[in-house]
Structures are given as C-alpha cells and as structure tokens.
Image (tube, grey):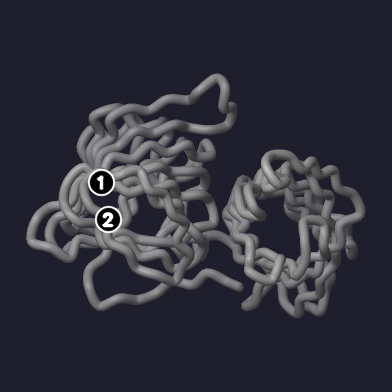
Amino acid sequence: MRIVTRTVATATVLLAVCGPSAAWAEAGSTGVTRGAPTGATGSTATTLPRAGSVVSANGVTRTVLSVSEPANAPGQVLYLTKVRIAPKARLAEHFHDGTQVATVQSGVLTYRITSGSVTITSARGVARTVTGPRTVRLRAGDSLVEGAGLTHYGANATRKPVVILTAALIASGAGIATPVGSATTGTGLFGTAPLAITLSIPARSVATVGPAGERTAGSLTETGTGTVGDDRASTGPYEVRLDATVLFSYTRGSGPFTGVMTYTWPADGSTLVATASGATVATADGGATFAATLGVVGGTGRFAAVTGGTGTYTGSRGGAVGSPITTNSALTVTGL
C-alpha cells in the first residue's frame, strides 16, 4: 500500500512545527510566521521553534506553548501547542513521526481517519478505538491519542472556532506533522511501486502477561528479499533485501511498535538504514495490519551521501505474532 496525496476542492493547510532539519511551516504561500527560530529562511529552520512562535494560514493557527528535548527520550522532541481552526477551515491530511495526544478545548472538531486507528476518550471518560476510513465529531473535553502510521486530518464544519491543545513526542528532525505525499521531495526509490517483500521471522522473543494473557511484548527479527523493476539509479529488475529488528507492546493484539530497517542491494552491497515507528491493529481472523513512518538514518556504498529521508512501511499477517508477514516499503532520500 502506498500513501498518495488527495486533491480536495476546499483550501487546506497543515501547520508543521519542525526540528532542525525539517520545514518550519507547511502553511502555503499565504501563511504568516511570527517568532520563527533564529536562522530560519524561507521554509527551513536550523533550530527548534521558540515558545510563543505562531504559524497561521488559511484559517488555521498553531501557537507553540513549550518545547523540550527530554533527557529520558533521546532523539525525541516534546511539543506543547494550541491549534485554532476557524469556521469552515481544515488541515491537510497528515501523519505524525511519533505520538500526539490532543484534547478539544472548545468547539466541535470534525475528525477524519483515512488510514489506521485512533484511541478516543470522551469527556465522560469512556474510551474507544476507531479505525479508518471513518469520520467522527469531537466536542469540548473529548481527547484522542494519535500514533505513528495513522493518517488523518481535522476540520471545522461549524460557525464557531475550534480550539485544540496538543502534546506531541516526535523524532528529532521531523515535523510535528508531515503532510501525506510530502515525501515526494528528494529521490524516490523503488520506482513507481513500493517494494513488496514477504518477511520470515527467523528469531523472536515474546512474553505473554496479564489477565487471560491479553498483553504481549517482545522483539522480532524479520528478513526477506523483493524484486523491483526500476530504482531510478539503475535499470532493473533488481533485488533488495530487508532485515528488520522490531520491538512491540500489544494489548489484545494491537499496539505500538518501533524498529530498525536495513535495506541492502545485494548486487553491490549498498545499504540504507531507517528507523520505524508505527502501530499494529488486530483483525477479527486472528491476524493484524500495521503501518509505520520511516526516518532514513543514512547509507553505505552508492547511498553513502544520503543525508536523510522519509518513507512508509505497511503490511499484514494472517496469523499470530511471529507469523510471516507481507510488507510494502516506500522510501524517498535526500543527498543523492
């Protein structure tokens, strides 16, 4: 599965608060930024945004209330922000390279889940998991938890403003929100289709705990090879091997996972290494689907000049944890 950009008739905007190597604002040509970080020129920034910074465009305003790089979460940036959505305005479809929690302070938020699942807690304290594609409406006091791999957007269909308070723990260097399809900048790998690989699980360590064994946690070693006909850097067909180490923590088969993905081109030994952050959703037949965002760390061989990049990692398995899985990877790299 490849995430693609949707074109909508109404004006859309995504305000992104970013780390050192990412865009400060995805706000469009009419956006206004106040209190941008020192060194920011155009749409790039060299430092973290300051508390009090404001990005505004097309009826959506995001105010940065606080920024921190927690010592107990190396490689992560913690943001506290307030978002105001004017009547009839909406954000662009996006995902988070980490976890965001949000609560509606006022107004009625129209919330569209295009892919993945989100946990919503009502103002009365009743929690539920909602899986897309689906649209729900949230009111003052309602809150939600958005994990990596969830694609979604918020909108205001009413005549009164919507105000949302958000806290997000995001990978350093990534924006607090990444527009779907934004990874088209840079050099796209694997041609016009994602890299499809069926992964075997040669090693696993799984612990089952809790009432009725409803919680599982552990690690998986995954490996497999796929063939693609065009990689923008040579003529195909050619092979790519994926070796992954994944850590997970599930409740009744659903929950977050993180991983390190190494893509190797056996023809010349070149590699790309990426981190993964995503979520797994259990299915009624005992299997699961999953989706994650990828952050490219770097590479070797013909990818030695790669300075970063983004991507998606999706797939499914038909059995319990440890069963073979089918996967699709899409990668776009910078620096080539």
**For residue 262, side relative to residue 61 (left or right):** right
**Label 2 Cα crowd, 10 Å radius (few <14 / some 14-19 / many 20+):** many
In percent of the image, x 39 and y 34: which residue is there? 79
Residue 50 at what x, y percent from top left?
Answer: 31, 28
In the image, farthest residue toward the front: 212
Residue 286 at what x, y percent from top left?
Answer: 71, 66
Q: Nearer the viewer, residue 329 or 108?
A: 108
Q: Any mark on residue 162, and which?
A: none
**For residue 169, side relative to residue 218 (left or right):** left
Q: Nearer the viewer, residue 335 or 91?
A: 91
Q: Secondary structure at mark 2?
A: strand
On screen, 137 above or below 5?
Answer: above
State how far apart marks 2 and 1 are (Cα). Answer: 7 Å
Q: Any mark on residue 138, and which?
A: 2
Check the picture and name the quadrant holding the N terminus: bottom right
Quadrant of the rendered structure where residue 290 is?
bottom right
Residue 109 at what x, y percent from top left?
Answer: 24, 57
Q: Any mark on residue 104, and which?
A: 1
> How many callouts does the rendering have?
2
What's under tag 2, amino acid-wise?
Answer: Leu
What's under tag 1, amino acid-wise?
Answer: Val
Disc 2 or 1, which lies upstream in sequence? 1
Residue 102 at what x, y percent from top left?
Answer: 34, 43
**Label 1 Cα crowd, 10 Å radius (few <14 / some 14-19 / many 20+):** many
On screen, 274 above or below 135?
Answer: above
**For residue 19, side relative to residue 7 (left or right):** right
In percent of the image, x 40 and y 70: which residue is there? 134
Quadrant of the rendered structure where residue 110 is?
bottom left
Q: Nearer the viewer, residue 187 or 55?
A: 55
Looking at the image, do the residues carrying marks 2 and 1 touch, with CB atoms under 8 Å apart? yes
